[in-house]
Amino acid sequence: MIVLFIFIFIFYEFILLTRLSAERCLGEADGYLKKSRSLGKDIVIEKSVLYYKGLRLLGNSIAFNPIDSRFYFEYAEAVVGAGEDSQLSGLLEMDRLGEGQTRNTDGFYNLAKTRYVEAISREPTNAIYHQRLGRVYDKLSDTKKAEEEFKAAVLLSPQSIIIQIYLSQYYLSRNNEAEFLSHIKKAIDIQTSTPGVYVCGDLLSYIMSIGREDLIKK
């Protein structure tokens, strides 16, 4: 009985330690990534080194806690961020493939896709995960899968203004006026459903940026 108690205690301490280590890696990674993003384009080497350290730490967080979906999601977000930065993606890929290799942004999106899928497998009801995965499928020109993920996101969180705005942007970029109006009007309805609350914040900024103030005029 004593041996069993000791074993359970050691196992519990091990689990606690690995989870704390995962959180520590996540926190440190966030610091490196934020510092990297704050640097100008003229300091690209230091920028890429900091970003690379952040990615390595995010990978460590997954190794310490492969159960928690957050770590896969944060890794995917960081990889997408690298892929969307032409200077950063070029240097990070050079580090991985060797000088002289052709930069291929799809490589970053494919890696992000894998991590998003792993996050969803651990937390399938998270609407933001589905929306982000849909965004990556869109980057990879897989329209069918992109729209499947967007629909899943809306079904899981129909009252999310953020998701409705993103989908309106997605359909606007494809000149699909009907779907654009459906999602932007839904976002407006959600925000103004409380008496006395008007269109404001990110939603108002977005509507004004695309010149569609007519949608909120009484």
Image: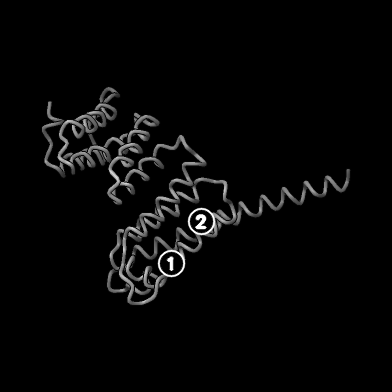
Q: Of marks 1 and 2, which one's residue comes earlier in the chain?
A: 2
Could you tell me which secondary element the residue under label 2 belongs to?
helix
Q: Does 99 appear above or below 199? A: below
- Residue type for callout 1: Tyr
Quadrant of image for the N terminus: top right
Q: Does 183 appear above or below 54? A: above
Marker disc for residue 26: 2
- Count neighbours of disc 2 (C-alpha within 10 A) and say few if under 14, some if 14 to 19, many if 20 or more: many
Q: Residue at x 70, y 53 (%)?
A: 14
- Percent from the top left, x then y, of residue 33? 41, 61
Q: Does residue 205 appear left or right of residue 61 in this picture?
A: left
Q: Quadrant of residue 107?
A: bottom left
Which residue, given by chain and number where applicable, does mark 1 sit on? 52
Q: Nearer the viewer, residue 88 or 34?
A: 88
Q: How is the image coloured?
A: one colour
Q: Does 116 appear above or below 63? A: above
Q: Residue at x 47, y 60 (%)?
A: 29
Q: Nearer the viewer, residue 31 or 69?
A: 69
Q: Residue at x 41, y 42 (%)?
A: 129
- Residue type for callout 2: Leu
- Give how far apart the Cα atoms at labels 1 and 2 are: 14 Å
